[in-house]
Image: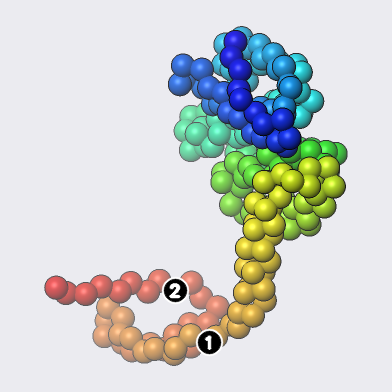
Amino acid sequence: SFEIAVEEEQTPRFYRISYDGGSRPVTLVVAPEDNITLESVGDIFLNYEVEGSEESALIREFNRDYFKACDRLAHIAEGIGTHIVYSKRDAYNLAQQAIQTQLSFVGAHPNTLAAFYAMRHSVAEQYIPQLEGYGVSVVHYRTVLDALTKRYPESPYIAIIEREIAEEEAMIDLAGRVQLASYPDIQLEDMYKVKHKLSELDGKVVLLYFWTLE
């Protein structure tokens, strides 16, 4: 049991609780006058209940569903290529499930700090890079920003969302101005001293190997 000194007018803040360094930390949303009870069995991150904070309970709901899928994804990723029978399709489907869980949660709770917490995870995309961009987007960030600005206008996390939106929009703008340039039509000799131009190999798989002598 412990107390945290919180200013009376302070908007809710995130706090992370870890136990014995052997588990992922549990994230709580703490507001002034909150009296939060946290109970767990075994792994504090996977098996805990929280009372006294609606936002903290929502985070627990997200963790349970999202990381359950991500942990299974990690298990499958470790098993691919071994004697364990898993396929890349299994991993892809599970990653899609995790992303859909994330998007559904954010869409259902846009005016909560729990949604802000949920948006900032990209575990599934780290395992399946092909799904990058299919999850949380600028649209979701803007939706949460608008909702949080109304509910917690003084929250410091609003500035973080605004900054991340600006960075993402800058990347989108940059990508839109990128022009495809043709490659230099270099001419090289093969192992038999026969010269070839790159333009002669269009449509074929080409490996260019460069080296230098020091």
| Of 163 and 102, the residue lying toward us | 163
| Of 88 and 46, the residue lying toward us | 46
Instruction: Estimate how packed mark 1 is, as few (under 14), some (14 to 19) or many (20 or more) residues with alpha carbons within 10 Å.
Output: few
Which of marks 1 and 2 precedes in the sequence? 1
Task: List x then y, in percent, for residue 120.
Answer: 64, 44
- Quadrant in the picture for residue 46: top right
Q: Is residue 72 above or below residue 38?
A: below
Q: Residue, x 55% and y 30% (percent of image)?
A: 75
Task: List x then y, in percent, for residue 39.
Answer: 66, 11
* Eye-nearest disc, 2 or 1: 1
Amino acid at circle 1 = Ser
Task: List x then y, in percent, for residue 2.
Answer: 59, 14
| Of 200 and 12, the residue lying toward us | 12
The N terminus lies in quadrant: top right
Left or right position of 34 against 19: right
Q: Separation of disc 2 and disc 1 at Cα?
A: 16 Å
Disc 2 marks which residue? Answer: 206
Check residue 90 in the rendering and tell me which mark sits there, or answer none. none
The C terminus lies in quadrant: bottom left
Disc 1 marks which residue? Answer: 182
Amino acid at circle 2 = Val
SS assignment at label 2: loop
Q: Residue, x 40% and y 71% (percent of image)?
A: 207
For the view shown, which residue lies furthest in the left direction?
214
Instruction: Estimate how packed mark 2 is, as few (under 14), some (14 to 19) or many (20 or more) residues with alpha carbons within 10 Å.
Output: few
Q: Residue, x 64% and y 58% (percent of image)?
A: 163
Task: List x then y, in percent, for residue 31.
Answer: 72, 29
SS assignment at label 1: loop
Left or right position of 43 against 209: right
Q: Is residue 169 visible?
A: yes
- Quadrant in the picture for residue 110: top right
